[in-house]
Image (cartoon, rainbow, N blue to C red):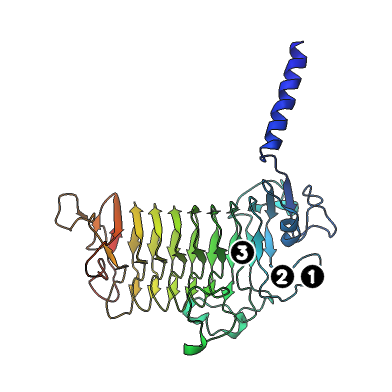
Amino acid sequence: MKAKTAVLNLVAVLCLLAAGGTWGKVIYVDDDASTGGDGTSWTTAYRFLQDALGQAEVGDEVRVAQGTYRPDESSASPQGSGDRKASFVLPEGVTAKGGFAGLTGDVPNAWDASLYETVLSGDLDGNDVALDDPADFRDDLSRDDNSLAVVTAGASTVLEGFTITAGHAQPYRCFGRDCPDVVPTLGFNGGGVLIREGDVTVRSCRLHHNFAAQEGGGVFVHGVGGVLLEDCVLERNGAYQGGGEGLFVHEGTAEIEGCELLMNWGRSEGGGLGTRDSDITISDCLIRRNEATSYGGGLSVFEGTATLWNTIIAGNSSDGGGGGGSLQVLMLCCADVPSPTTAHAVPAAGGTGWARPSWRLDVCSAGTPHRNMVGLSGRHNANHFRL
């Protein structure tokens, strides 16, 4: 009787899990797989990531083996369609996870994002000229055929363990009046990852050599909340007209934890990270050696709140006449920021800034706008801030 009761209880639990929508399947992808797979195992894996995403539903996890995947490739277009609008669109409630050993590994299910690099590339023709300076991306002809957004994240999705590169959010090369007046304009933002729906997590990803004609060359968040970037590296991304060359948050909320923003470049503001009308929290991050032509080489905050914990901002630069090599703060007041002479302020190693466990910038309710609240020492600010 007890055994029968236990079986009935187990069946009840399984039914509840299924009814609650938490019972998802695992779908496997490996670019070394044979064609015609159904994705139910590594030996029958899909060859193309697009095929797997087309079958994924809420609660599913798509596991992707080491290799290179392009958004215009699928079983219908195995050689690629050349469609610049093609993007890896994550369906609502789906987790996509790269970094698996796959069929060429001794243990296919072994996971290490660094060892088993899984690349999502916007270089559709495989012809990108190797460039180290993001300032050169805009005018490079070899990138004119690249994907406008390598990844587009749906609501409640997770993107983990990928290298995302060569996104080029510039539908056409524009100059002056030829460029869109409205920022943001669809297709001109988020060359690496475009986030326009909420509750998205990007974890253990590396984003490099992506570009946007407007904002957010690496990652662009627009009008949504619940976005988390965790343990990511955003390196050598660029943006031209707007700001936030590594990451830009426009009218949204985001948490950035344990990330590195390195050597990103932009013609406008916020070489590493920029926000507009947004609320962000930055913790345990390194923002270093980024550059903005105008203001805020490391970080630019425009009308919103920014809370920083245990974060280093160092070695950033800007060429704008107002300075602000490390930070630009516009339309904000810093009521909660101590002066360097207060009892809690101590010199940060390597510069003349100050250290504090946390720092919060709040929107001014009235008064004159304040620009460059930190980083007043000149255009190329080598100050080292630990906030």
The residue at 81%/64% (across/down) is: 75
Q: Position of residue 271 (x, y in %)?
A: 40, 71
100 or 179: nearer the viewer: 179
Q: CA distance from mark 2 to mark 3?
A: 12 Å
321 or 136: nearer the viewer: 321
* Residue under numbered circle 2: 72
In the image, 138: left or right of 337?
A: right
Q: Secondary structure at mark 3?
A: strand
Vertical position of residue 317 compared to residue 259: above or below: below
The residue at 44%/53% (across/down) is: 255
**Residue 247 appears in view:** yes
Looking at the rendered structure, which numbered label has been put on residue 77?
Answer: 1
Looking at the rendered structure, which numbered label has been put on residue 1?
Answer: none
Q: Residues within 10 Å of mark 1 (few under 14, many from 20)?
A: few
258 or 273: nearer the viewer: 273
Q: Secondary structure at mark 1?
A: loop
Q: Quadrant of residue 91?
A: bottom right
Q: CA distance from mark 2 to mark 1?
A: 7 Å
* Residue under numbered circle 3: 151
Vertical position of residue 153 compared to residue 316: above or below: above
The residue at 26%/51% (across/down) is: 356
In the image, 58: left or right of 159?
A: right
Query: What's the amino acid at mark 2?
Result: Asp
